[in-house]
Every structure is written in structure tokens, then in C-alpha cells.
């Protein structure tokens, strides 16, 4: 089962929820993998450490146009759906904008003159870490300056979902927002937990996330973090729209202290361990329903 932990904005507590859910699942005796899909700012290993087993370099194929062989017909630019090729016919100038290239290969199909070759560009790494015999960590991490983390996220998730282990649970710690990295994360999810906070900003971004998931036809529920921080509007909205409230986690100074020190709340506080076990059971019930 693939469970994505997501949010319409940063700072709501996605990684907090992901790491605690990971901890209780493996203590319940189930094999589990946590995938850090926030490739631009991965931080799961700040809370859960493991032995590095392997680093796999992820590269993107970038077209290279040889101006000496190019006849400047402009076909490659016409075929490019991502506006990644600058073509100035009057100046006989043509160039690939690497940051906009999506590695689709259309320009190679378009060129009939052999003017386009390819090169590899490193965009990041996917790291596998051993936590224990029941649990592992997969981290995606982009190179500085890489325009899109989507290829890395897809590779990291592929490693997790292709694991043949029976009764395996995959926790996908999503990047914030509802842009392409979010879509790439929730695409393989069987269920999505949307983490929000009871504030006007939290509710606004929750609505955007819900609208996106409905369009993708993904089942989801909501976890309210830092309950009583703001107002009750988020609860009223969930009830009005028949959206399941999976859990409320209170605004607690002790939680903030434990999290800021890089510890797992469920490990240090038995009451909260029980709370996250209940969250796990509710998610399974929602999926089975």
C-alpha cells in the first residue's frame, strides 16, 4: 500500500507525520519504506537515520545541436512541446535551453540531418538506507540548480513500489504545494493524507489540494496539525464537504521541543504512539472501504 503524506503549503508537518507513521508501522510488525520525495529539501534523515547501502546517480538526456550540420529548418523547435529550443532563422542561431528540456526525444525524431546528438546531465541521486530488517529509507536529492525534481521523485518511488516484499507499506513524503513534484508523488499513491493547520492560509491551500486530488480521482483524508492554533473554519469546511478527518494533533510545546531536537514523538510519548497507530488503522480502513 502506498500512502502519500502531502500538503498545499510548506511547514504544516508533512515530514513530522511521515516519520511518526513510519515508526509506528514498523513497530506494528509490517515491512515499511519511507520515501523522501521532497528532493529539493530532503529532511527525513534528520529524524530517522540509517546505514547507506547505495547511491544511484540519476541523469537526464539532453540534446546537443551541432550548428555545422544543422540546416536551420526549425523542425526540432516545432516538435518541442516545452519551448526548450531557441531558434532565430535570420541569424542562423539555434540552442537548447537545458533547464526546460524534458528528455522526450522529439527533437531527435524531427531532425533528418543528423545534427542532434545527446549527452547525459546529472540531476541528482537516489539513496537507499537500511533502518532495520523491517524498514528502509529511500531519499531523492537534486543537484543544486536543477530545474525540476520530477525525474528523481519518479525513480525513488519506482524503487519502493517495485519491492516484492509482501504486505509492504510505502510512506511517500511529498513536496509542498500542488505543482508537478506533488503530482509525481501522489500519482502512485493508494491513499493521500493531507496535512493542514486550522488557519486561513491552511484552509485555502487545503482547498487547492483537495480540488487537485479530486481531479486525479485519488482517495484522501485530512489530518489537522497544531489544532487550536487558529479557528474552527477548517473543521466546518471538512464537515460541509463530507471529507474524512483522520486525526487532530494539538498545538503542544512538548511536541515542538521533541521535533526540533530531531526525535520521533511516537517513540518518546506513548500517548502519541497510540494516536499514530490509530491513524494507521484509519488509513487502512479508508483504503479497504
Image: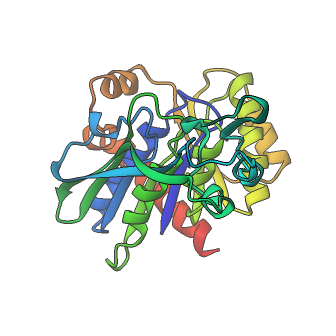
Q: Is residue 125 left or right of residue 152?
A: left
Q: Whole-percent x and y of residue 228?
A: 61, 25
Residue 167 spot, x, y in % from top left: 38, 76
How far from the left and from the top, in percent, is residue 277? 41, 56
**Residue closer to the observer: 19 or 177:** 177
Q: Is residue 7 above or below residue 221?
A: above
* Figure check: 207 above or below 116: above
Residue in front for this viewpoint, 173 or 254: 173
- The answer to whether residue 244 is left or right of residue 63 is right
Identity of the residue drawn at 73% across and 59% down:
216
- Residue visible at 34% across and 79% down in the picture: 164
- Who's the residue at 34% across and 59% down the image? 33
Q: So how many labels did they put on this image?
A: 0
- Compared across the picture, whether 25 is left or right of 1 comes to left
The reply to whether residue 47 is in sight is no
Observer-nearest of 177 and 69: 69
Q: Residue at x 39, y 73 (%)?
A: 162
The answer to whether residue 66 shows anywhere in this view is yes
Amino acid at each position: 500500500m502506498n500512502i502519500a503524506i502531502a500538503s498545499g503549503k510548506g511547514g504544516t508537518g508533512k515530514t513530522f507525520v511521515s516519520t511518526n507513521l513510519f515508526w509506528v508501522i514498523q513497530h506494528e510488525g509490517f515491512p515499511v519504506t519511507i520515501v523522501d520525495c521532497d528532493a529539493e529539501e530532503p529532511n527525513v534523515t534528520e529524524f530517522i537515520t540509517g546505514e547507506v547501502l547505495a547511491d544511484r546517480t540519476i541523469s537526464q538526456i539532453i540534446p546537443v545541436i551541432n550548428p555545422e550540420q544543422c540546416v536551420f529548418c526549425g523542425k526540432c523547435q516545432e516538435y518541442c512541446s516545452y519551448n526548450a529550443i531557441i531558434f532565430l532563422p535570420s541569424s542562423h542561431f539555434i540552442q537548447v535551453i537545458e533547464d526546460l528540456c524534458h528528455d522526450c526525444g522529439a527533437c531527435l525524431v524531427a531532425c533528418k540531418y543528423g545534427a542532434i546528438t545527446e549527452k547525459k546531465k546529472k540531476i541528482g541521486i537516489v539513496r537507499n538506507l537500511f533502518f532495520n530488517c523491517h524498514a528502509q529509507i529511500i531519499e531523492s536529492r537534486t543537484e543544486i540548480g536543477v530545474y525540476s525534481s520530477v525525474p528523481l521523485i519518479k525513480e525513488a518511488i519506482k524503487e519502493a513500489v517495485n519491492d516484492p516484499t509482501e504486505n509492504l507499506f510505502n510512506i511517500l513524503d511529498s513536496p509542498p504545494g500542488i505543482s508537478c513534484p506533488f503530482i509525481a508523488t501522489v500519482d502512485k499513491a493508494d491513499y493521500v493524507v493531507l496535512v493542514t493547520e486550522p488557519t486561513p492560509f491552511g484552509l485555502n491551500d487545503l482547498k487547492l489540494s483537495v480540488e487537485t486530488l479530486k481531479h486525479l480521482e485519488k482517495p484522501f483524508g485530512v489530518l489537522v496539525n497544531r489544532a487550536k492554533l487558529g479557528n474552527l473554519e477548517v473543521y466546518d469546511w471538512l464537515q460541509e464537504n463530507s471529507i474524512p478527518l483522520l486525526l487532530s494533533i494539538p498545538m503542544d510545546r512538548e511536541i515542538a521541543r521533541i521535533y526540533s531536537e530531531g526525535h520521533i514523538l511516537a517513540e518518546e510519548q506513548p500517548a502519541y504512539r497510540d494516536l499514530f497507530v490509530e491513524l494507521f488503522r484509519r488509513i487502512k480502513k479508508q483504503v479497504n472501504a
